[in-house]
Image: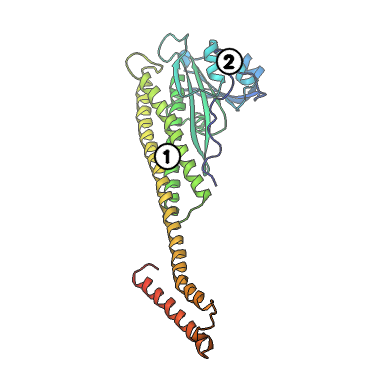
Amino acid sequence: MRPVRRRHREWRGTYAPPGLDPIPGGGTDEALVCDYGPAGVSRDDIVTADELGALPAAAGGRTGAVRLVVITGVEVGPAALAVVDSLNLNSLEREDVLSDGHQVKIAALESSRAAGDGFLALLPFAVVDGEQVVHTRLALVQRGSTVVVLQETELAPVASVVARIRDGAGRVRQMSANYLAYLMIDGVADAGSSVSALLLDRLEDVEERILEGHTGRALFREVQDLRLLSVWARRTVAGLRDELAAELGPGEGVFEAAVRPYASDCLEHASMVQDGLESRREQAASLVPLYTAISGAAMNEVMKTLTIIATIFIPLTFIAGIYGMNFATMPELAWRWGYPAVLLVMAIVAGGMIWYFRRRRWM
């Protein structure tokens, strides 16, 4: 089984002026809406795009009510357009949220007036799904007391955060929407940690198979897949770390004061994951020359065996060639014991060469 379900989709479309919405591709018409606060979860159901557009704004303020909207699907659909319309984003921000070709980005919304008021995050990342690694993407927008998440597939980290809201685990119900957005970003860093652990297991398994002498196109393809995956996963985590470092530097940034300590911890976590993935990348790169060396050694063994066999038969062929000339004056032709004598000589020559090769540890 190959470790990667599908490769990361780099943007290869035709150029279009910035700020244009992607063309809707028949995506989902539904979204998960979860309203919660210190008092508990007041709403947790699936709504259509029309219902989504008619929902009143999240209460926020002193009530502490927060709204989470989750839309799942690769293609842009009515639900995604409806929720993006309700956020009052400018054209460039809309394009960022709805497109799928961007690198890691965390930036305050143009209309935000203070830290924690609103920001968007574009997070391509790799996540473990069973025994494979899936390339996916998460777009997040926090506007006031509302957090909107657009995810390609129903995988962690969004599912784990939703479960924490429903179960009341941790401090998520007591915190603001800015903290909820931080949890999503921290979940992406956690996904990178899981990928690093899976890569370590796969790389150790592949290295053991190579050292045991297993070779072949499929094994080399797996080595290359692991190397490319480690490079891509490290690049995305490094991008996340750089964006977090920029937002936690001098100035307000996108995180409010109560959330900045948690975001700083997420930055440290991302740095650790980046270091781990860098080690995985170096380990995967080292398997390529190891595979080449083992394959060369196996080929050398084959060539040595064939060379020994050919060397043994060279004198035997020489003897057979001499007596195959059939000259009339050859005395052995008329000798009664000539044939078995020649066979005995050939056996002695072959046996002597085999003994010599074994003594020299060539076979």
**For residue 247, above or below residue 306:** above
Q: Which kind of residue does numbered mark 2 sit on? A: Ala
Where does the image place residue 128, in percent across and percent down from the top left? 50, 39
Residue 75 image offset from top left, x and y in percent: 62, 25
Q: Residue at x 47, y 76 (%)?
A: 319
- Say which of 290 and 54 sits in front: 290
Which residue is label 1 attached to?
196
What residue would you read off at disc 2? 16
Residue sitting at the far left: 250
Q: Can residue 194 be seen?
A: no
Q: In this view, does 259 lie to the left or right of 93?
A: left
Depth order, front residue of 287/236: 287
Residue 14 visible in the current orientation: yes
Name the residue nearer the viewer: 273 or 333.
333
**Residue 78 x/y as whole percent:** 65, 19
First-in-chain label (1 vs 2): 2
Number of numbered callouts drawn: 2
Q: Coloured how? A: rainbow
Looking at the image, residue 223 lies above or below residue 252: below
| Rendered residue at 38%/21% (across/down) | 259
Describe the element under mark 1 as helix, strand or loop: helix
Residue depicted at 36% across the width and 27% down the height: 267
Q: Mark 1 or 2, which is nearer the eye?
A: 2
Spatial separation of the CA atoms under disc 1 and disc 2? 36 Å
User: Which numbered circle lies on residue 38?
Assistant: none
Q: Is residue 125 above or below residue 298?
A: above
Q: Is residue 49 left or right of residue 335?
A: right
Residue 355 x %, y %? 38, 75
